[in-house]
Image (cartoon, helix red, strand yellow):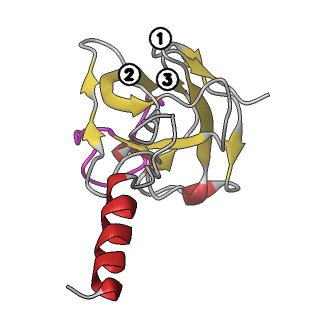
Amino acid sequence: MSRYTRLLTLSAALLGSSCYDFHQSGPEDPSAVKTPGTVSVTVEYRQPNGCLGASGCDDSVVFFGSWMRPGGQFRLQRVEGSLVWRGTAREVPVNYPPRDDAYTVRVYDPHLRDSCTAGFQAERLKLGGEALTRYDGGGCEFQVALVFIDDNGQGHNPY
């Protein structure tokens, strides 16, 4: 073996036995992203007296929430002997205390189909026991109520 080869072999052996460990102390994996919790929320809507539609007045009231995926709306059940409709929105992401925009909610009420609302309504609506009083989107069919939902399923009107 030549002198040059021996020197190269010796250098490789010395360098190979003392490899630098690039890992410094600290976590191996990134910290987990904390996702907001979800809760079930009671929905209650009081239907007005009388029906403004020529037909379909016996149809169900349907609830819509901005957190829902398209097609996620659901029918409320009529409380027998009253004009109240109830249901439960499941897996609603918690957004209270406010960290972002309030959710928008509304119902489709067949009693109001022939009014300027075209059946879409945000008045007389309760979410998580809170009577909603803040509205957006103007009147008629673009009206929505604004709400925050806490981790107990209680609704909160925006400030």
Q: Tell me if 92 is positioned left or right of 26 in this view.
A: left
User: Which amino acid lies under the numbered mark 3 shown in the image of this protein?
Assistant: Leu
Q: CB of mark 1 within 8 Å of CB of mark 2?
A: yes
Q: Which residue is mark 1?
A: 152
Cα–Cα gap, marks 3 and 1: 12 Å
User: Which amino acid lies under the numbered mark 1 shown in the image of this protein?
Assistant: Asn
Q: Which residues are magenta?
A: 47-62
Image spot of residue 132 (x, y percent): 62, 27
Q: CB of mark 2 within 8 Å of CB of mark 3?
A: no
| Secondary structure mostly taken by the magenta-highlighted segment of the chain | loop
Mark 3 is surrounded, within 10 Å at the Cα level, by few (under 14), some (14 to 19) or many (20 or more) other residues, namely many
Does residue 68 sit above or below 141 in this rendering? above
Mark 3 or 1, which is nearer the eye? 1
Residue at 60% across, 29% down: 148
Mark 1 is surrounded, within 10 Å at the Cα level, by few (under 14), some (14 to 19) or many (20 or more) other residues, namely few
Does residue 126 sit above or below 75 in this rendering? above
Q: Nearer the viewer, residue 37 or 17?
A: 17
Q: Tell me if 44 is positioned left or right of 9 in this view.
A: right
User: Which amino acid lies under the numbered mark 2 shown in the image of this protein?
Assistant: Val
Q: Which residue is mark 2?
A: 39
Residue at 39% across, 39% down: 28
Which element carries disc 1, helix, strand or loop?
Answer: loop
Q: Which residue is mark 3?
A: 127
Does residue 83 sit above or below 7 in this rendering? above
Which element carries disc 3, helix, strand or loop?
Answer: strand
Let me know if residue 95 appears in the view.
Answer: yes
Q: Nearer the viewer, residue 26 or 150?
A: 26
- Check residue 55 for magenta coloring: yes
**Quarter of the image where the N terminus is located:** bottom left
Image spot of residue 29 (x, y percent): 39, 41
Checking the image for residue 72, the label placed there is: none
